[in-house]
Amino acid sequence: MSQMICLLLTLLGALTCIALSIIMRQYSTYKNPKTLDIHTPHPLFIHANLDTLKQTENTTRNGIIRTYHSSDWELLWLENVHLWQERGICEALQQQKEQLRLFMNSTCCAHTDTHWCLIDDSVHRFWYNTLSTEIQAEKPSGISYVSPTQPISPDNKKIWSWFEITNTNTGSISYEFIEPLVSHLRHPLAKCTFAEKHDLLIVDRSYILPAFDKSSTSLLFDAGASSWNAGAGGPSLSYFASAWNRYGVHWDRIEAWEGTTSVSDFYQTVPAEWKSKTTYHHEWISTNPHQTPFIPSIIELKTQQDDYVVFKLDIDSKHVETAIVEYMLAWEHLYLVDEFVWEHHVDNYLMAPDWKSSQDMNKSISDSYSYFLNLRRKGVRAHSWV
């Protein structure tokens, strides 16, 4: 009997050693994201706060169900951003060169008779080599033809996330693509010196992909617009007027809020063709639905269910912005907002030199992912801004 017990204990000890060996190998990968297989992310590392496996259906129009799907590339980041946000974002991207190549190629808005293409968000532009993946500000030599600028139209579900839109009245299914939630939620390569060394991409918005139903009335609500053609991260109003025009958006009405610029100074910057469509409010926005101007309440008052509504929020006030977003996530009229554009200033080591005191050090990049992911799961095309 004692010999049998000894044999069982020996076998149990061997199995324990094997199990510990497996756990230590997994722990090593967990602690060093650079060793992670980028093609098959391990489910052990899913961040519970992001709940990457959850999918929510939301009826946002009569008889229309919108279901959000994260691309493979977005899922990789959802599962690992809590590791990489500590100082490993650019290092992780260096292991994702194929994803970056496919993404960058699909953001070309003008092609040439060479391997170079133009990436242009209507405010900033740069040139990208689809073969070598080189980036440069100046037009490369050897180009004799540049095609007209076109909207981007990606269709790779491994890279770009998408909304599945089901019409329950007709049974038809269509798809709307949207930029994936990756990197630190601006241009994926912004601040990564291995890709470009001159901060060309820090305020680039070429990655933002809108979707527009041309039959709708288009309304833009811009909280944080001090000028038509200027701004700390680049102008917003001239960008929306120009870049979104490529997608068929011709704004029927624009309302803008900012607390420092006077009404007369603001309107001096507005082009003549836009003055009759633009209303400027020299006011700071509110976080209280019972105190005006509270933008969600204004949207509820001034829009219809079938309007195309874009709400841009960027006033560099961390507490005001976060309070509004948290209100929106519980707002019963969120279906009125088609696209939401927001720059969330959080604890981001790459952006710290630029954001400085506007950072909310109680929020992480992972928290930003949660906000944008949850808005998308509620049917809103939520975009991270610059």
Image (cartoon, grey):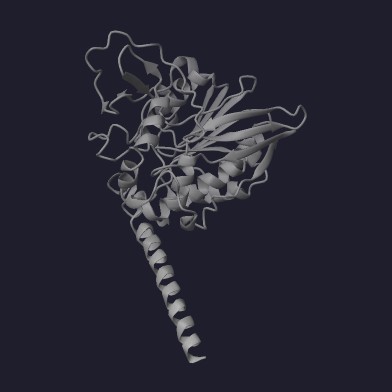
Horizontally, is 307 left or right of 326 in the view? right
Residue at left offset 43%, top offset 80%? 10
Q: Is residue 300 visible?
A: no
Residue 261 image offset from top left, x and y in percent = 40, 34
Q: Dividing the image into 4 quarters, which one contains the C terminus?
A: top left
The x and y percentages for residue 263 are: 45, 30
Q: Position of residue 276 (x, y in %)?
A: 53, 19
What residue is shown at x 42% (from left), y 28% (from top)?
Answer: 266
Give the vertical position of 291 relative to 263 (above or below): below
Q: Quadrant of residue 69?
A: top right
Front-lying residue, 196 or 257: 196
Viewer-proximal residue among 339 and 135: 135
In this orientation, which residue lies closer to the viewer: 352 or 103?
Answer: 103
113 left or right of 319 in image: left
Residue for point 62% across, 43% down: 378
Q: Is residue 123 above or below residue 328?
A: above
Numbered marks: total: 0
